[in-house]
Amino acid sequence: DYLLFLTGVLKEPLSTILVTIFLAAVIGSLCGYLLGRFFGNSLQRRPDSFFFKKKHLESTREFFEKYGFGALVLSRFLPVVRTFTPILAGISKMSWYSFLFLNILGGAMWVGILVAGGYYMGQHFPWIINYVQYIILFFLGITTYTIIKGYLKFKQ
């Protein structure tokens, strides 16, 4: 999410950034939906690995059951849950048209809010542009640390 926010600070035209990231978000979720739709049963039987844990699938299922179709829109703002929600929509055989509509709506909101927030920051606090590389390195460091820590915990 932080990288989405920071892209709004870049000097690229806002429309180019919005369209590119929106398309990537929608296409990525469509791939997850199709994965769940066609391979859902084998995914549910798959053993846990570093990248796939049944507990994440189960917590996403609970989220999906609690919020229904709105989960597709809300999950965009929740790391991990956002990854598994389209897969669960496919596993549950959600209507293609419903999924497509909610995927587009959620993707537009997610990308719009985060990128526009970054754009606003870049326009109103231009000095932040001088520090973007340090901000990115900081968050990449946190992400790398979290991944390594999770991997070491998984190996134990």
Image (spheres, helix red, strand yellow):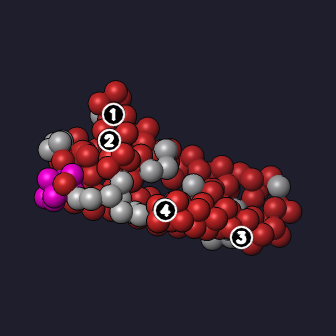
Dot placed on the residue nearer the N-terminal end, 3 or 4: 3
Please, what is the three-letter code of the amino acid marked with disc 4?
Answer: Gln
- Nearer to us: label 2 or label 4: 4
Q: Secondary structure at mark 1?
A: helix
Please, what is the three-letter code of the amino acid marked with disc 1?
Answer: Glu
Res 103 seen here: no
Q: Which residue is mark 3?
A: 137
Q: Which residues are magenta?
A: 36-44
Q: Which residue is mark 2?
A: 58
Q: How many marks?
A: 4
Please, what is the three-letter code of the amino acid marked with disc 3?
Answer: Leu
Coordinates of residue 124 in the picture (x, y in percent): 80, 52
- Nearer to us: label 2 or label 3: 2
Looking at the rendering, in which quadrant would you find the N terminus? bottom right
Depicted 75 relative to depicted 127: above or below: above
Instruction: Estimate the spatial distance between the alpha carbons at disc 3 and disc 4, rounded to whole Å.
Output: 29 Å
Res 31 seen here: yes
Dot placed on the residue nearer the N-terminal end, 2 or 4: 2
Residue found 83% across the figure and 70% down from its top: 130
Instruction: Estimate the spatial distance between the alpha carbons at disc 4 and disc 1, rounded to whole Å.
Output: 28 Å
> On the image, which quarter does residue 72 sit in?
top left
Depicted 113 relative to depicted 12: above or below: above
Instruction: Estimate the spatial distance between the alpha carbons at disc 2 and disc 1, rounded to whole Å.
Output: 6 Å
Magenta span: predominant SS is helix
Q: Which residue is mark 4?
A: 156
Label 2 close to label 4 by CB (< 8 Å)? no
Q: Which residue is mark 1?
A: 62
Label 3 close to label 4 by CB (< 8 Å)? no
